[in-house]
Image (cartoon, grey):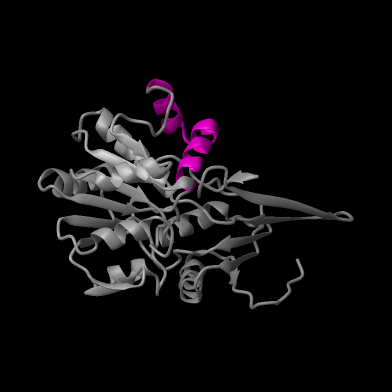
Amino acid sequence: MHEAGHIIGAASVRFEIKEGTHTKVLGFTGDLGNPGSKLIVDAVPMKDLDMLVSETTYGNRHHKEKRTAEEVLIEQVTNTCIKQDGRLIIPAFSVGRTQSVLFTLKKLFNEGKLPPVRVFADSPLALASNNIHNRFSHYLNVETQDYKRDNDGSLFDFKSLHLVEDDDDVEDMEQYRDSCIIVSSAGMLEGGRIQHHISDHIQNPSCTILIAGFCSPGTLGAQLLMGQSSIRIKGKDKYVYAKILSTDVFSAHPDTVGLQDYFAKSNSDKLKNIFFVHGEEEAMYDLKDALEEGLRTKVIIPGRGEEFLI
């Protein structure tokens, strides 16, 4: 097992397959992680492979955000919650993305870089995932482990954080009238508690919806990012008056540069083939073209049910 860097505990697998006197070494990445994550370790390339099977999720995309996560959140919290009495709503996946956002907010509040704006974390799965990150923090990167040890032994708890765990918490959140931050799932806005918040605030011009990741075509998140003037949510048509923004600073996938760097570090005289089995077709072929210009390894994109003798 090798660190994959995608979410806590994610692993790539290196197989040594022996048959008679011959040994073949095959690597399988699973989802890889974006280098420099707030919490997660960087992916560790597998060495001395004969063949590599890999993902290509962002095979033809570049991460656009050049600022740090701290800079992004300071700007958005300041513009929405401090300069005006608004609400910053951050749709985020329950596992990984929510923890990165809450960890960054904790650091900003504890270091006095933001005033104590109330933060509601509204996702049962995310709260369970918070507990897992705290319990198994030795799987996280060194910076995170050091921060937890030096700051009250918790990765996410801070004075202005309110966890929405039961009906009373929901009522308290709904009755709160001051500016605040709401972090809720799901990341693409297709289900979960985030739909309630979007439905309530999409027509509020003082509200900012900060989409913190990729949204698949056709999802509600993608519709908002396309700039639609109205959406249908929870059975009702609503105009979009809230400000819609996006950032990829919390991305859990490497972009094309990160993938090519990973493959370069995995490459050796032994590596004969790289197989792309996960990703959109266009991303696979674009990354294949880019790799074959710089590496001597042959890249193969298998068809469904196609077999290869290794």
Residue 199, placed above or below residue 34:
below
Residue at the left extreme of this rendering: 83
Q: Position of residue 233 (x, y in %)?
A: 34, 69
Range of the magenta residues? 125-150
Instruction: Label the magenta part by its dominant secondary structure.
Output: helix
Image point (52%, 68%), residue name: 279
Inspect this view and state whether residue 189 appears.
yes
Q: Residue 291: say if magenta.
A: no
Image point (18%, 34%), residue name: 115
Image point (33%, 45%), residue name: 171
Query: In which quarter of the view is residue 81 placed?
Result: top left
Q: Position of residue 163 (x, y in %)?
A: 38, 39
**Quadrant in which the N terminus is drawn:** top right
Of residue 297 and residue 114, the one placed in the foreground of this image is 114
Image point (50%, 41%), residue name: 128
Residue 99, placed above or below residue 305:
above
Of residue 33 and residue 15, the one placed in the foreground of this image is 33
Q: Position of residue 77 (x, y in %)?
A: 20, 45
- For this view, does 72 lie left or right of residue 40? left
Inspect this view and state whether residue 228 appears.
no
Residue 255, placed above or below residue 181:
below
